Image (cartoon, rainbow, N blue to C red):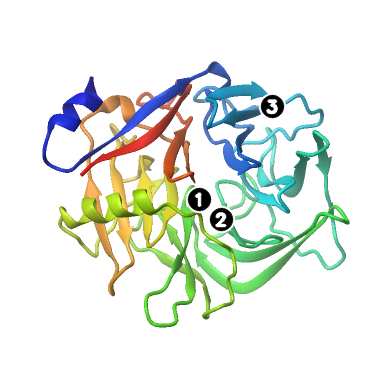
Amino acid sequence: RAVKELAKNKSPKWAYRPIQFNALLARAFHSCTELRGRFYLVGGLRAGGAKDPSSDTVAFDPAGGQAVKVEARGGPRRSHHDAAPVGGRWLCVVGGWDGSRRVASVAALDAERGVWEAWTAAPGNCPPAGLSSHTCTRLSDRELRVAGREGGTRTQRRYGSLYTLKLDPSARTYCYKEEGCHTASRSGHCAALLQTPGPHPGHQLLLFGGCNSAEPEVAGHWSYGKIKEEPPIAPRLMEQLARLVSSGQGSQQGPWGLRHHSCSVVGPFAVLFGGETLTRTRDTICNDLYIYDTRNSPSLWFHFPCADRGLKRVGHRTYLWNDHLYLVGGFGEDGKTASPQVCILDLFV
């Protein structure tokens, strides 16, 4: 009904439309990664306040709309981790909370053989003290940039180190290299690898949120041609986002004190949704859509609030696939109940 009402309204609106309900998908602070045409949900928490993360893996087929539990032994017990596909075959889970401590190790699901593998540290590995609520951004098929606050449960650093994580599937090894530069101490932030405008655009990695600040932070810059990752093609969604921001009022001020939100890059846009705000003591879980537009300098923020409290989410994931932006899991308005929904972003522009 809410979608129909929005569609009737001539002013630009948006909504996340549920397309699938399945109890297997109900979790938060999980990872959601596309591999071989399926979304793999790994671990996470089943209820607010839980400290023991799940060790199961669920595969969701966005084309067929089916979710199944992956019967692979040895899955990592993780939450507040991140994951990335490697070589079109492996799903690598990096760091996170294992129920008793923060880890920086790498576990990999071999999608071809249907087994989990615990990869080992290569010589020269310089790992973080422990990672949770961090981000892993693909720079190439075997290289990730890891950013976020590190440390144990009793010791927190006032800054975050940046690491390059190199993965070698043939040897089943990983190797961290500290980049020698620091960021603000961030936890529950998001990262976006975006092209810089100009005749010879390079790339920069921006960190949003995860601390009591509205300013994005540059966590890496690469000149033209250095990043060879092919971004997903989403012409329809890019056009709709461009029309949506053209109807709004841009600002250089971004969301203040946001964490555990989601972020997906759609061409020149970083699309942020939901999360928890650090600026309020009540009603902290959000359902706002923020779009960061890098087409011009300076880049501008566009804020599109939502009246549907049922869309409040924290600890969720969004994923761009086949010209659609999917929303998967997360805790709802009460911060305790995990959503069993998969939704698609609809834009009425």
Helix, strand or loop under label 2 = loop
Q: Quadrant of the C terminus?
A: top left
Q: Residue at x 50, y 50 (%)?
A: 187
User: Is 122 displayed left or right of 108 in the figure?
Assistant: right
The mark nearer the N terminus, 1 or 2, is: 2
Whether label 1 touches label 2, CB < 8 Å: yes
How far across and how far down the image is residue 184, in percent? 47, 63
Residue identifier under label 3: 56
Closer to viewer: mark 3 or mark 2:
3
Helix, strand or loop under label 3 = loop
Real-space Cα separation, disc 3 to disc 2, in angstroms: 26 Å
How far across and how far down the image is residue 162, in percent? 60, 66
Residue identifier under label 1: 187
Q: How many marks?
A: 3
Residue 130 or residue 319, whichever sits in front: 319
Check the image and report above or below for 259 versus 337: below
Within 10 Å of disc 2 (Cα), the crowding (few <14, some 14-19, many 20+) is many
The mark nearer the N terminus, 3 or 1, is: 3
Res 169 quadrant in image:
bottom right
Residue identifier under label 2: 149
Kind of residue sitting beneath label 1: Ser
Check the image and report above or below for 250 versus 12: below
Q: Quadrant of the N terminus?
A: top left
Closer to viewer: mark 3 or mark 1:
3
Kind of residue sitting beneath label 3: Asp
User: Is 156 displayed left or right of 209 in the figure?
Assistant: right
